[in-house]
Amino acid sequence: MTEYQGSEFERELEEKTIEIRRVAKVVKGGRRFSFRVTVVVGDNGGQVGAGVGKANTVPDAIRKAAGRARKSMRRMSLYGTTIPHAVIGEVGGARVLLKPASPGTGVIAGGGVRAVMQAVGIQDILTKSLGSANIHNVVMATMDALEKLKSVDEQARLRGKDIKELMPFWERGKNGI
């Protein structure tokens, strides 16, 4: 019965292969080629993980990457269909800026950042990739930025303010707030 529940849980996860790259190791007799794969796994409800796998064949590398992505899944602080505040994530030379957007904006992102945003379930966001364009580092920088997010409740408590004061500008005009 436990196995069925685990497989049922895995069916709900969305898996996206972002990059498949052939890499080489130089040895005495020449070059040894293998494949490096970057995968993002998410449930479209606030949980996301990224993983990298390397193997001699592409299917093995994808399987390894997906397994590592599932193990690294974390719950992210979201605010409706966007994020609670702007944040910058950094890994190596890659920097990724994430900014909240009003409903209806959509996912304004490219490449690896878009895949991570869709996997976590964010529908309205503005992003900008700064620095290195290395896809692996951009994905990891996006994950770093999402992990830095703090919930509106937590921020209000830490700053000693009312939750209404920290709401985004498009929410403040509603309901007489």
Image (tube, grey):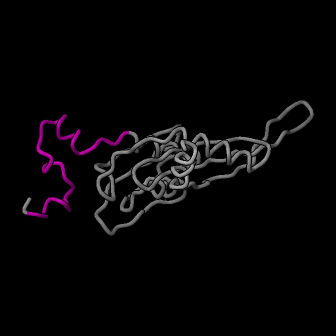
Let me know if residue 173 is in the magenta part.
Answer: yes
Residue at 55% in and 50% down: 10
In the image, residue 156 lies at what x, y percent?
17, 41
Q: Which residues are magenta?
A: 148-175
Let me know if residue 63 is in the magenta part.
Answer: no
Query: Position of 67 compared to 95: left or right?
Result: right
- Classified by dominant secondary structure, the portion drawn in magenta counts as helix
Q: Quadrant of the C terminus?
A: bottom left
Residue at 47% in and 53% down: 43
Residue at 51% in and 50% down: 9
Question: Taking 9 as reference, is 105 above or below it?
Answer: below
Residue 72 visible within the image? yes
**Residue farthest toward the right in the current orientation of the protein:** 29
In the image, residue 113 lies at what x, y percent?
49, 54
Q: Quadrant of the N terminus?
A: top right
Query: Position of 138 compared to 101: left or right?
Result: right
Query: Position of 32 compared to 142: left or right?
Result: right
